[in-house]
Amino acid sequence: DAGVTQSPTHLIKTRGQQVTLRCSPKSGHDTVSWYQQALGQGPQFIFQYYEEEERQRGNFPDRFSGHQFPNYSSELNVNALLLGDSALYLCASSRRTSGITLTGELFFGEGSRLTVL
Amino acid sequence: KNQVEQSPQSLIILEGKNCTLQCNYTVSPFSNLRWYKQDTGRGPVSLTIMTFSENTKSNGRYTATLDADTKQSSLHITASQLSDSASYICVCDREGGGADGLTFGKGTHLIIQP
């Protein structure tokens, strides 16, 4: 049973460029959340997707956008990259039970390490 | 403001020794508390998840405790191994908050020396 898979694992971009990160959730999971983790910090919530729609969003600018596909996989897009966007981007999947309440396990992928020069 | 504070920030112990990591939270209304292990440059891996009514939960050599009255949790590691070297992150769920309701601590960086 494959867990949460993310790609690419590492990438380097320059300021102003755009990046797309991809995530496949754990088998049986239908909800995907994205987090940004700066070095030495805890993960910060970006947004969550369920039924192909953005359901919740953290305090991130519109440069951060996403998408969820019918097979529950998801993409995170970041436009007009800034130096401060350098971080580990984590995808987490879960199985929605009722409403937006997050119950049970939240499984994380290995992350995509983005470096902006 | 919902916050999760972890201590110590970093800890070095010898292989085979026990250690206890602390987590204090101000998340309200509180529903669940989670502990994750995160190896450097990797994604967090779940160790335990406890509801507000649970006092203790074990996962092998890891034992988490929760005191919802004092809003404190601890993670005890028994007979540490070199592979326990990692950051340990405490996460609190705000009831009804969904993914946006998770508050992450900054983690305790644990180093096990041979």
Image (cartoon, rainbow, N blue to C red):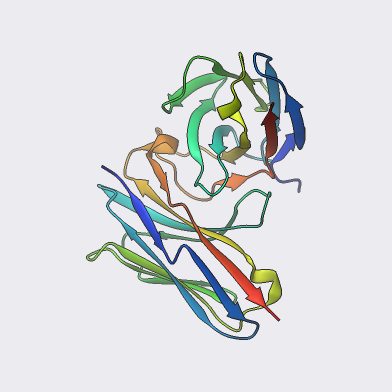
Q: Can you tell which quarter of the image residue B86 is in?
A: bottom right
In the image, residue B23 above or below residue A18: below
Residue B76 higher or lower than B16, as above or below: above
**Residue B102: where, in percent of width, then height?**
41, 43
Closest to the observer: B2 or A103?
Answer: B2
Front residue (pair B30, B72) = B72
Q: Quadrant of residue B32?
A: bottom left
**x and y, in percent, of residue B63 in the image:** 49, 74
Q: Quadrant of residue B62?
A: bottom right
Image position, residue A103 (x, y; %)? 45, 46
Number of numbered discs on residues: 0
Residue A96 left/right relative to B80: left
Position of residue A4 measured from the top left corner of the image (x, y, whole percent) = 69, 42
Relative placement, left or right, of A85 versus A55 is right
Judged left or right of residue B95, residue B17 is right
- Residue projecting furthest to the left: B69
Residue at 41% across / 35% down in the picture? B100
Picture residue at 57% right of the left edge, 74% below the top: B12
Q: Image check: B88 left or right of B101?
A: right
Please indicate, yes or no, whether residue A98 appears anywhere in the rendered image: no
Q: Residue at x 63, y 19 (%)?
A: A77
Please determine whether, in this image, residue A5 is positioned above or below residue A68: below
Determine if residue A62 is in view: yes
Q: State whether residue B54 is above or below residue A38.
A: below
**The C terminus of chain A sits in image quarter:** top right
- Residue at 70% across, 21% down: A20
